[in-house]
Image (spheres, rainbow, N blue to C red):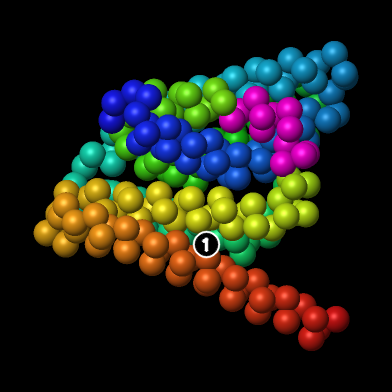
Amino acid sequence: MELFTPEFWSALLAIVIIDLVLAGDNAIVIGMAARNLPKENQKKVIFWGTFGAIAIRSVLTLVVVWLLLIPGLRVVGGLLLVWIAYKLLVEEKSHEVKTATNLWAAIRTIIIADTAMGLDNVLAVGGAAHGNFVLVVLGLLISVPIVVWGSTLILKLMERFPFIIYIGSGVLAFTAAKMIEEEPLLNGIFGEMAAIKWGFSILVVVLVLLAGRLKNKSKARASVSTS
């Protein structure tokens, strides 16, 4: 993929959206891990914890980008991403995390928690980058500051405007479909026919969003009936 082409900018936009939607909860983890520390240490913990988490996430994403070159793994990654897109819509996330009492313990907690929680993000960004690590780095540089300093706003917006979650899930589902379409083993199915590829991508997005919507309606009805 050439730099600064329409394809490059659309992929970068997808990566930023994925980072913001999937990493908002990670910022809460950062805040919770540092909340019991003295004020003068909290900024250090947030900076170094975030720096370490970004470094590990960048390396993991590079590994994923490389792994996706292995025949067959794009299909596996795409199917996993479809499941992640669905879970984003229906799963109630927990922000429980062990608080730390000293600076280095807090930094370690942030890095470990962010790495564990960020595996879905790594896979999604790796797929959206289409093998271009420059896109990965740019996406992180743009979205991480927003996530770290605007996490509360992001989460409040998601709660107030649920359609934001659906947009994020749709982007994930679209990325998953593209990963599957780009699998060399499936060239005989998709080939170079744009209409078939677009039709498949739209179908995957619609099915994920519809399944998530139906599941949420079912949960809402169950909650009303038990209350």
Question: Relative to residue 48, is residue 64 depicted above or below?
Answer: below
SS at mark 1?
helix
Identified at 59% across, 30% down, the residue is: 143
- Residue 152 lies in the magenta stretch: yes
In the picture, measured across the screen, residue 191 lies left or right of residue 108, that is left
What's under tag 1, amino acid-wise? Tyr
Residue at the disc numbered 1: 86
Question: Relative to residue 127, is residue 143 depicted above or below?
Answer: above
Q: What kind of secondary structure does the magenta stretch mostly adopt? A: helix
Q: Could you say where residue 53 lies in the image, as x and y percent from the top left?
A: 57, 27
Say which quadrant the C terminus sits in.
Answer: bottom right
- Residue 198 lies in the magenta stretch: no
In the picture, measured across the screen, residue 132 lies left or right of residue 45, that is left
Q: Could you say where residue 7 lies in the image, as x and y percent from the top left?
A: 35, 36
Say which quadrant the N terminus sits in.
Answer: top left
Identified at 47% across, 41% down, the residue is: 14
Residue that protrudes farthest toward the left in the picture: 188
Residues drawn in magenta: 143-154
